[in-house]
Amino acid sequence: MLKGFKDFLMRGNVVDLAVAVVVGAAFTAVVTAFTEAFLEPLIRLVSGGGELGGTLVVNGVEFNWAMFVNAVITFLITAAVVYFLVVLPLKTLQERRKRGEDDGPAEPTDVELLKEIRDLLREGRRDEAAGRHAADGPAD
């Protein structure tokens, strides 16, 4: 039971997915901090500044529209980075493979495999011959 679970976890795509989630969360935190520290104050400044900059008050209820705009900008930046750094390169790679430009790792041909077998057999014969000569003892 535990071996199956270990095999599942060690499968390449599960580990890659876990890494992607962690990196994505960290990147989202960086983008959020950037937009909250720099863009939201700029939005508040452009909208009149002061205590009520970036807000709208209706019947005593405050609507913080600057925070909403900030969240939209955070989403757009994150989506753009994911698209241009992950989706687009993978899509390009898949198209190349379909066209045959990038076949991935090449498999050995039959001739290459036969040559490798021949060389291994030759080595085995040499080792056998050397073993027989060593067993005969030193030549006088």
Image (cartoon, rainbow, N blue to C red):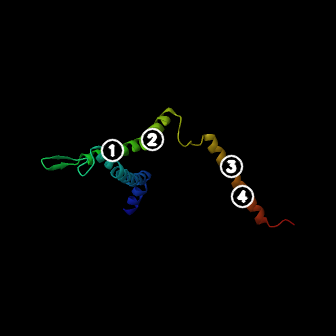
Say what secondary structure mark 1 lies in.
helix
- Report the front residue among 36 and 20: 36
Residues at circles 2 and 4 in contact by the CB criterion of under 8 Å: no
The type of residue carrying mark 4 is Asp
Which residue does the image show at 48% across and 34% down from the upper left? Answer: 98
User: On the image, numbered disc 2 is attached to which residue?
Assistant: 90
**Mark 1 to mark 3 CA distance (whole Å):** 63 Å
The first of marks 2 and 1 along the sequence is 1
- Report the front residue among 24 and 106: 24
Please give the label number shown on residue 119.
Answer: 3
Q: Is residue 20 above or below residue 138?
A: above
In this view, the mark in front (1 or 4) = 1
Q: Position of residue 21 (x, y in %)?
A: 38, 53
In this view, the mark in front (2 or 4) = 2
Q: Can you see residue 4?
A: yes
The type of residue carrying mark 1 is Ile
User: On the image, numbered disc 4 is attached to which residue?
Assistant: 127
User: On the image, numbered disc 1 is attached to which residue?
Assistant: 73
Q: Position of residue 116 (x, y in %)?
A: 65, 47
Q: Quadrant of residue 6?
A: bottom left
Q: Badge 3 local density, few (<14 within 10 Å), some, or many (20+)?
A: few
- Report the front residue among 52 and 80: 52
The first of marks 1 and 4 along the sequence is 1
Q: Is residue 111 left or right of residue 27?
A: right
In this view, the mark in front (2 or 1) = 1
**Mark 2 to mark 3 CA distance (whole Å):** 40 Å
Q: Is residue 52 left or right of residue 114?
A: left
In this view, the mark in front (1 or 3) = 1
Q: Badge 4 local density, few (<14 within 10 Å), some, or many (20+)?
A: few
The type of residue carrying mark 3 is Asp
**Mark 2 to mark 4 CA distance (whole Å):** 49 Å
